Image (cartoon, rainbow, N blue to C red):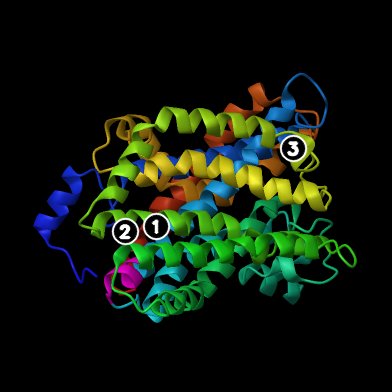
Amino acid sequence: MTTGYSRSDERTAARAGAPQVTGHQAPLDGVRAVAALAVLLVHVASSAGTTTRGEGAGWLFNGGQVGVAIFFTLSGLLLYRPWATAALDGRPAPQTGGYLVKRALRIVPAYWVLIVVYMVTAGRAHIGDPVTWVSLLTFTQVYVPDPWWSSDLGPAHLGQLWSLSVEVAWYVTLPLTAAVLSWAVRRARTGDMGTIAKRLLLAIGVYGALSFPFTLLAYFPERNTQMGVWLPRYFVWFALGMALAVVTVWARLDERRPVAALCNAVADSWAACWVAAAMLFVVAATPATGPLSLAESGGPWTSVLHMVLFGACALAFVAPVALAPPEHRAMGAALGNPVMRFLGRVSYGLFLWQMIIIVAYYEILDRTFRGSVPTDLPVLAAASIAAAALSYYLVERPMQAVARRFRG
């Protein structure tokens, strides 16, 4: 088992087509941008009524829900990768305290600004309600029994934040999850890199598969709609990214390089992968994965198909980027260009601020469910990106500078 690699090893790995496992990867900024724009698209189309009016191919906008699957897959890839390196290379695991502090500094400040703005504007009727304040500030609004808001997703102006609640729950549990996966690997009692990696992938597969019985549990013995926005349902989407993390680290560390060659083959087949992602997008956009209205929940089997099809679409899109070697020309041109990198940098703010802007826009114009995507999307996208840029430069980037002081 390899215990470390030098700069010469890095150069050898790069020549062999091994993917990058440390440092900043510009194409992944583009992936974040695509995810954030997909979420924006589905929210605009839903608020405009385009997805449910039955006009033309408006139902296709429902496929924008894949943005959530892409975000979760990216989190699994990037955040689990240090633990994957520790498991495969014998290095110390990340320090839990430092990791959690860095996550909090990255996520919480900009989020709290949004919550305060919401509570003094659209949510001012509940400004004196401590349950509303506490649940929103602690990402726990999806667990509140009998809330005043009508949807399991939370208040209408903050409806997209259910997925951030899932993300935060995953962040908090990741060190424990990684420890359990590492324990499963250590039981192999072998020094062979391939055996350890395969065992780790199997354990991650079991972890991801837990999503499906949990999804069905939400329907039996009786329907519990809130469970549809709880973390265990989404293990599988995080597991996809975690598996990619294992494969990238394995390809980088294994001197025999067959896995690196496989990664290179997938990256070179990016066009085929993205065509497959587009086809899955179309199928996932249909009612086969649940109602076209975001306010409704589907049945048990459509919920399972939702996880499978959107997860497969996200994997087909993300895998070629994650497995590509550094300086891959196609990835750099499509996703690592200056525009996509900028949108990727501000993607968190774009995710945070889009819904409060969308709902306010349609309420002020009295056009809720009577809008037009071609007319409204450019305006709402521009407003959301402007708010995201302000969030990034005034709040997020200063907090990132603070976060760099912590090890994790």
Quadrant in the rendering for residue 2: bottom left
Q: Residue at x 84, y 64 (%)?
A: 224
Residue named by callout 3: 47
Pointer 1 with pointer 2, Cβ within 8 A: yes
Residue 299: x and y, percent? 84, 50
Gap in angstroms between the C-alphas marked 3 and 2: 42 Å
As drawn, 15 above or below 230: above
Q: Secondary structure at mark 1?
A: helix
The single residue placed furthest to the left in the displayed view is 8
The dominant secondary structure in magenta is helix
Residue 13 - label: none
- Graded by Cα atoms within 10 Å as few (under 14), some (14 to 19) or many (20 or more), the crowding at tag 2 reads many
Residue named by callout 2: 249
Membership of 351 in magenta stretch = no
Residue 55: x and y, percent? 80, 21
Q: Residue at x 78, y 36 (%)?
A: 287
Q: Amino acid at mark 1?
A: Ala
Please state the extent of the stretch shown in magenta in the rendering. 84-91
Q: Nearer the viewer, residue 32 or 264?
A: 264
Q: Secondary structure at mark 3?
A: helix
Q: Amino acid at mark 3?
A: Ser
- Graded by Cα atoms within 10 Å as few (under 14), some (14 to 19) or many (20 or more), the crowding at tag 3 reads many
Q: Nearer the viewer, residue 215 or 121?
A: 215
Residue named by callout 1: 245
From the viewer's perspective, tell me whether residue 187 is left or right of residue 230.
Answer: left
Please indicate, yes or no, whether residue 50 appears anywhere in the rendered image. Answer: yes
As drawn, 20 above or below 1: above
User: Which callout, 3 or 1, points to the residue nearer the camera?
Assistant: 1
Image quarter where the N terminus lies is bottom left
From the viewer's perspective, tell me whether residue 296 is left or right of residue 201.
Answer: right
Membership of 88 in magenta stretch = yes
